[in-house]
Amino acid sequence: MRLVLSGILLAALATGGAWVWAGRAGAIAPIAPLNAASFDAALVARGEVLATFGGCESCHGQDLSGGIGLPTPFGTIHSTNITPDPDTGIGTWSEVAFTRAMRQGISRDGHLLYPAFPYDSFTNTSDADLAAIYAFLMSRPAVAKPAQPDALPFPFNIRRAMAGWNLLYLCQGPFAPDPARDEAWNRGAYLAEGLGHCAACHTPRNRFGARDAARPYAGAVVEGWYAPALNASSPAPVPWTQEALLNYFYDGWDADHGIASGPMQDVQRHTAALPEEDTTALADYVLSLQSARDPAAAEAARSFAASADANAEAPGFAAGQAVFEKSCQNCHRDGTDMVPLGLSSAVNLPTPANLYHVVTEGVVPSESAYFVKPMPGFPLLGEEDLAALARYVRQRFSTKPAWTDADLSAALTAK
Ligand code: HEC
Ligand code: HEC
Ligand code: HEC
C-alpha cells in the first residue's frame, strides 16, 4: 500500500513539476507543402525499408492515414494521419518537427503524444535514418482523413500528464553504442531498441504503462496475446540458436519452435524485409539477451515432444482429452510434418492466452512460410471446453507446471 501511495505521489509530483516544463514545448512553425519529387529516390527507398521495419503500417494503416484504434489498459488510442496531407496529416511538418515527435513524443503543434506511439523506442533512431523515413513519408500520396477522438477516461485524457511520464520514463536517444561490444552487436541493439521496438511488446510494463526497466524482455501481455520472454527466462523448450531465429524471422516458422502468429506475424514480415546483415545482427542481439543453455536440452526437449506417450497418463482430463481427440488429434498426433505441440511456445508460456487465440482463430502462415499448412479456427468451442482443452494440452505436452484455474480464466477474460 505504501509503495502504491509513494508511486502515485511521485508521479503526481513529477507531473506537477513537469507541467511547467511541458508548457515550454511550443509549436514548430508549419512549412509550405513540399514537392514529393524533390526527395532523392535512394533516400526514399531507404526510408521505406526503415519505415517498414518500424511497423508504421501496422498501426497507421497501409495508406498511413491512421484512425486505427489501439487497445491499451488505459483506454483506446487512435493512430493519426501521417500522410503529407496539409490539413489532416503531417504535410506542414518540417523535418525538425518530425524528429521531435519521434524523439520526444511531441506533436508539431506542441501537444504531447501517448506512448501507444512507441516514441520511447523510436527515440533511439539516428538522425540519418529519421531523415530517410521523413523523405519516405513526405513522398507518399496525401490522404485527407481527420483524426478520430480517443476513448480515454479521466485522468488519462490529460495529455499534459505525459510530461511527467516522459520525465520519469523517456530515455531520449539517439542510441549510444556500447564500446565494449562489437559493431554487429551494436547494430542489432540499435535495430531492436529503436525502430524494431521489440521491447514495446516483450518487456512487461508498470502501472503507468512504462516498460519495467528492471525486467527487460521478460515477456508481457500485449493486445490479448503474450509476447514470450526473450531473455534468460525464454520459455522455448529447445533453446534458440542463430539459425532458428533466422528461420523464424525469414519464414515465420522454425521446426523447433513453430509458427509466428498474432501481432508477431507483422513484425516477422518486416524483419524479413531488412537487409540480410541487419536480420542477422538482430538475431545475434536477441541471442545475447538469453544465457547460453545446455545443448543437451535441445535433444531432451525434442525427444520428449516427439514421444507419442508424453504425459499420456495425466489424470483427470477427460473433458479436455475428448475435445482434443475430436478436434486436434487428426493433425497434431496422427498428422505428419507438424511441429510437435510440446515445442510450440503457445503451450509453454505462463498463460494460455496464445493457445486460446490459435485455437479459436486458427493460424494463417505468412506468405514466406508457404510450406506450412494453415490451421482452421474453432470459433464455436465454448469457454468451458476451451479451458478444459488448454488444461489438457498443457499437462500432456509440456513439462512446465500446469496452468491454474486462475491462469485459465484470466486469459479467457482478456481474450
Ligand atoms: C504500436 C503502434 C504504432 C507504431 C508501430 C507506429 N505508430 Fe505512429 N502513432 C501511433 C499512435 C497511437 C499515434 C497517436 C498518438 C497520440 O495521439 O497521442 C501515433 C502518432 C504518430 C505521429 C504524430 C502525429 C501527429 O499528428 O501528432 C507520428 C509523426 C508518427 N506516429 C510516426 C510514426 C512512424 C514514422 C512510424 C513508423 C516508423 C510509426 N509512427 C509507427 C502508433 C504507432
Ligand atoms: C506488437 C507486439 C510485438 C512486437 C513489436 C514484437 N513482438 Fe516478438 N512476439 C510477439 C508475440 C505476441 C509473440 C508470440 C507469437 C507466437 O508465439 O505465435 C512474439 C514472439 C516472438 C519470438 C518467438 C519467441 C518464442 O520463444 O516463441 C521472437 C524470437 C520474437 N518475438 C522476437 C521479436 C523481435 C526481435 C522483435 C523486434 C524486432 C519483436 N519480437 C517485436 C509480439 C511482438
Ligand atoms: C487441419 C489440421 C489441424 C487441426 C485440426 C488443428 N491444428 Fe493446430 N496447427 C495446424 C497447423 C498446420 C499448424 C501450424 C504449423 C505447425 O505448427 O506445425 C498448427 C499450429 C498449432 C499450434 C502452434 C501455434 C503457435 O503459434 O505456435 C497450436 C498450439 C495448435 N496448433 C493447437 C491445436 C489445437 C489445440 C487443436 C484442436 C482444437 C488444433 N491445433 C487443431 C493444423 C491443425
Image (cartoon, rainbow, N blue to C red):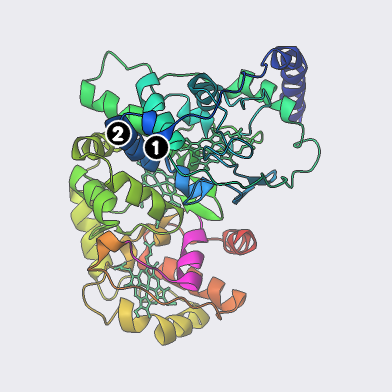
Q: Which residue is mark 1?
A: 196
Work out whether residue 146 or residue 236 is closer to the camera in this orientation and state it: 146
Q: Is mark 2 within 8 Å of ligand 1?
A: no
Magenta residues span 351-366
Q: Residue at x 75, y 26 (%)?
A: 8
Ligand 3 quadrant in view: bottom left
User: In the rendered view, does 189 fall on the left or right side of 218?
Assistant: left
Quadrant placement of the C terminus: bottom right
User: In the rendered view, does 376 fall on the left or right side of 222?
Assistant: left
Work out whether residue 409 or residue 18 is closer to the camera in this orientation and state it: 18
Could you give the CA–CA distance between mark 2 and mark 1, rounded to whole angstroms?
A: 23 Å
- Quarter location, residue 183: top left
Q: Is mark 1 within 8 Å of ligand 2?
A: yes
Q: Is 192 located above or below residue 94 in the figure?
A: below
Q: Position of residue 225 (x, y in %)?
A: 51, 55
Q: Residue at x 54, y 49 (%)?
A: 222
Q: Residue at x 46, y 47 (%)?
A: 57
Q: Amino acid at mark 1?
A: Gly
